[in-house]
Amino acid sequence: MIEELFPCVTEGDVGSSFANSDIATNGPLPNFEEFLKHICCRTRTQLTCMSLALLYLTRLRANHPRSRGSPGSSYRLALSSLCVATKYLYDDAYHTCSWVQVSMGLFTQREVNQMEMEFMYFLHYQLGVTSTEWNQWI
C-alpha cells in the first residue's frame, strides 16, 4: 500500500519528494514484506495500530498528493507511521532506541527521531481520529 500511495521517483522525474533517504545506496535492502513482518512481530504491533498507521499514510497522501517516494522511502514511511501510531495509542509505547533496534540496522536513533518529527509535521500534527472517521476507515 505504501508503494501505491507514494510511487518512487525515477530518473528524469521532477517533483517534490519527502522521506528521502540514502539507505538504498548503503547496500541491499531487506525484502519490504520481511521488513514489515520483522517490525510488527518484534514490537507485537496490534491490528488497531497497523490500521491507524495506514490511515496516517492515507492522510499523508491526501495532504501531499503530488509528492513522490524515493528508493527506500517505503521503509522510512512504514517505520515512521508505526512509530507515531504506537506512541499515539499507547502510554507505554516503545522508545526511539527500540525502533532503531527493530529497524534491521537501516536507521540510526537520530534518523528515527527525525523521521518521526517529519512524519508528524507532514500530517500537520493531526493525529486524532473521530469515531466516524475510524468506522469509515475500518
Image: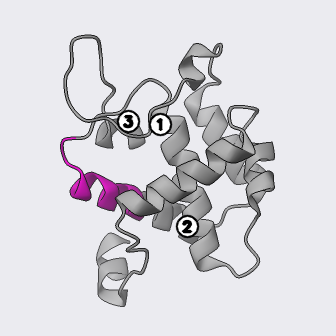
Instruction: Tell me whether circle 2 and circle 1 mark residues in contact (CB < 8 Å).
Output: no
**Which image quarter: residue 93?**
bottom right
Query: What residue does disc 3 label?
Result: 3
Q: Which of 8 and 48 is in front in this view?
A: 8
Q: Is residue 11 visible?
A: yes
Query: What residue does disc 1 label?
Result: 74
Three-letter amino acid code at disc 1? Ser
Q: Which residue is drawn at 81% across and 44% down?
A: 101
**Which image quarter: residue 30?**
top right
Which is more N-terminal, label 1 or label 2? 1
Secondary structure under tag 2 reads helix
Three-letter amino acid code at disc 3? Glu
Q: Residue at x 39, y 27 (%)?
A: 70
Q: Residue at x 19, y 48 (%)?
A: 65
Provide residue 131's location: percent of width, then percent of height.
Answer: 37, 88
Relative to 2, 38 lies left or right? right
Q: In which quarter of the image is the C terminus?
A: bottom left
Secondary structure under tag 1 reads helix
Q: Is the magenta stretch mostly helix, strand or loop?
A: helix
Secondary structure under tag 3 reads helix
Instruction: Tell me whether circle 1 and circle 3 mark residues in contact (CB < 8 Å).
Output: yes
Relative to 44, 51 lies left or right? left
Query: What residue does disc 2 label?
Result: 85
Q: How crowded is mark 2: few (under 14 residues within 10 Å), some or many (20 or more)?
A: many
Which is more N-terminal, label 2 or label 3? 3
Q: What stretch is highlighted in magenta?
A: 55-66
Q: How far apart are labels 2 and 1 at the CA level? A: 16 Å
Q: How far apart are labels 3 and 2 at the CA level? A: 19 Å
Q: Is residue 1 visible?
A: no
Which is more N-terminal, label 3 or label 1? 3
